[in-house]
Amino acid sequence: MSTYVYAITARSHSALPEGLTGVGEPPRPVRVLEEGELAALVSDAPEQLRPKRRELLAHQNVLAETGATGCVLPMRFGSVAPDDKTVTGVLAERADHYRERLEALEGKVEYNVKASHVEEAVLHHVMATSPELRALAEANRQAGGGTYEQRLQLGEMVAAAVKAREAEDAAYIQQTLQPLAAATSVGPESTGWLANVSFLVERDSAAGFLETAERLREDRPHLDVRVNGPLPPYSFVEPGPAAPAGAAEEKQRSG
């Protein structure tokens, strides 16, 4: 039977909570595979695993329960190895890497920050800060709206100003929060977000990080800033969560 991998941790990690279960229907018991100084938190893998809400929550619950008592390297949902031996073989092969990551991530959590523009607010902002745009808009108004070419010119200039503001605001967010983090990881670009950045934060410093994120909203009200966390440090397990699986992985992240 194939093996579902939730996380990698130190062999000295606290014992699993009694009765801890993971994915599957019925839920599979979570168990520990040990290899040298390392251990993998696993269960038997369901034959037809799908990223349904119940399964995603089960995966996250295992990480929350085990991460509360020590550092774990979280695997993304869907990490499946052919068998237990494959998992312990990878632990042995990449032992130095996993030990380094466990040491680097000890006492830290991930916060993912996404930001977008509040459309009306950013339009007002770029008009208020650009004398050129205001002058052109006023000239069009006095001309009864202006010609098609004049309206087109204004629209293109406003769009360019908003685009430039996106880049400036994205840099501002990262520059403001980065000093409060041990590491950062820029996520893939996606429609609707001008910034998508994960920050590795000391658990004891999380309150200060969240306060600074809140001030971003106050300083730039044209920004919609969303903070998701604390999360297991998915973005800082390198080179990626697929390593123990050697098989198909289905990446899922809340937020």
Image (cartoon, rainbow, N blue to C red):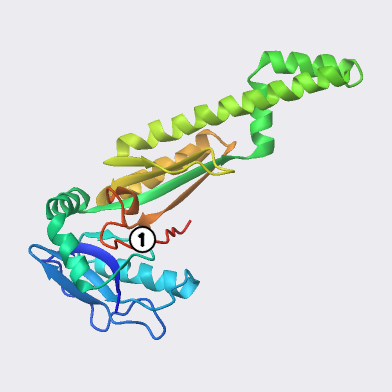
Whether 101 is drawn above or below 156: the answer is below
Res. 242 in view: yes
Whether 192 is drawn above or below 157: the answer is below
| Residue situated in front as seen by the camera: 113 or 36 | 36
| Residue situated in front as seen by the camera: 140 or 79 | 79
Is 97 placed left or right of 60 in the picture?
left
In the rendered picture of this protein, how many numbered marks are placed on residues? 1
Is 180 placed left or right of 136 in the picture?
left
Residue 250 spot, x, y in % from top left:
42, 61
What residue lies at 39% left-to-right and 80% top-to-bottom? 24
Is 169 placed left or right of 212 in the picture?
right
Q: Give the quadrant of residue 82.
A: bottom left
Is 112 placed left or right of 32 in the picture?
right
Res. 181 in view: no
The single residue placed furthest to the left in the displayed view is: 36
Whether 116 is drawn above or below 161: the answer is below
Residue 106 spot, x, y in % from top left:
19, 53
Instruction: Identify the element where label 1 is drawn.
Output: loop
What residue lies at 29% left-to-right and 48% top-to-bottom? 236
What residue lies at 36% left-to-right and 42% top-to-bottom? 185
Estimate how packed mark 1 is, as few (under 14), some (14 to 19) or many (20 or more) residues with alpha carbons within 10 Å.
many
| Residue situated in front as seen by the camera: 126 or 24 | 24
In this figure, which residue is indicated by the disc labeled 1? 76
What residue lies at 44% left-to-right and 76% top-to-bottom? 48
Type of the residue with mark 1 = Arg
Q: Give the quadrant of residue 75.
A: bottom left
Whether 103 is drawn above or below 135: the answer is below
For the N terminus, the image quarter is: bottom left
Residue 120 spot, x, y in % from top left:
69, 37
The single residue placed furthest to the bottom in the displayed view is: 26
Residue 73 spot, x, y in % from top left:
25, 58
